[in-house]
Amino acid sequence: MEQMRQKKMEWTDDEQINSCLTSCRTGYLGLSDGTEPYVIPLNYVWYNKAIYFHGADEGRKVRIIEANPAGCFTICEELGTMSNPVPAKTDTAYWSIMAFGEIKKVSDMEEARNIMQEMLNKYVPDYYNKPLASSHLEKYRSSLGSKTAIYKLYPTTITGKENPLDAKTKFSLGRTISMDLR
């Protein structure tokens, strides 16, 4: 794995990384389709130190994973823009996490049911009054007729990076360069 170029921005706090992986709502799965990159935004859960996502059991994503199971999963949060009288020093505050590993289809029905329950708990907490039945996963078909498949990326490497927000330079509408030159 290549080392991070800007080491001073690196996050090394596992608790902070786990917290962000747990709370972020959308992630981006990067795959390699031969010579062409393919990135898909996904709902996901971070559970037992792995990233789980679901989707149809057929299609381009599945074909790519079957041919090359290496994946990169990224989450990020933009925290604001920081203005500066020097245009090249105007910057964006953010944090980001990248997880690299191999993607595998979950074949164990109990694990798949547990993951789908975790998805429901994350995205619609307390909406359902009883746990998801395994039979739902076995019988469910999308409007296009495909089954639901659950995939797991167990990271071999996780990196985190942050450019913290400087509240004194945070840009907001109405702020002008003359305010920063005083």
Image: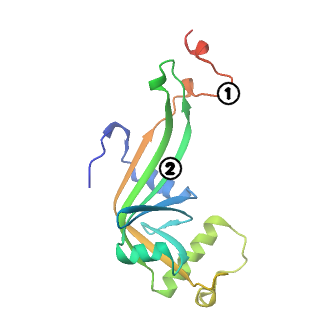
Q: How many marks?
A: 2
Q: Is residue 30 left or right of residue 156?
A: right
Q: Secondary structure at mark 1?
A: loop
Residue 138: where, in percent of width, then height? 58, 90
Q: Nearer the viewer, residue 8 or 71?
A: 71
Q: Quadrant of the C terminus?
A: top right
Distance (Cα) linking label 2 and label 1: 23 Å
Q: Nearer the viewer, residue 35 or 125?
A: 35
Residue 53: where, in percent of width, then height? 51, 70
- The disc placed on residue 76 is 2
Kindly identify the amino acid type of the residue bearing the numbered disc 2. Cys
Image quadrant assignment for residue 169: top right
Q: Secondary structure at mark 2?
A: strand
Crowdedness of circle 1 by 10 Å Cα count: few (<14), some, many (20+)?
few
User: Which residue is pictured at 49% across the width and 23% down the height?
Assistant: 87
Residue that extends furthest to the front in the rendered view of this protein: 35
Which comes sooner in the sequence, label 2 or label 1? 2
Residue 154: where, in percent of width, then height? 38, 69
User: Which residue is pictured at 40% across the width and 53% down the height?
Assistant: 14
Instruction: Note whether 84 is above or below 77 in the view shown.
Output: above
Residue 91: where, in percent of width, then height? 49, 31
Which residue is label 1 attached to?
173
Crowdedness of circle 2 by 10 Å Cα count: few (<14), some, many (20+)?
many
User: Which residue is pictured at 42% across the width and 66% down the height?
Assistant: 49
Residue that extends furthest to the top in the rendered view of this protein: 182
Kindly identify the amino acid type of the residue bearing the numbered disc 1. Leu
User: Which residue is pictured at 67% across the width and 27% down the height?
Assistant: 173
| Disc nearest the viewer among 2 and 1 | 1
Instruction: Note whether 59 is above or below 168 in the view shown.
Output: below
- The disc placed on residue 181 is none
Q: Quadrant of the N terminus?
A: bottom left
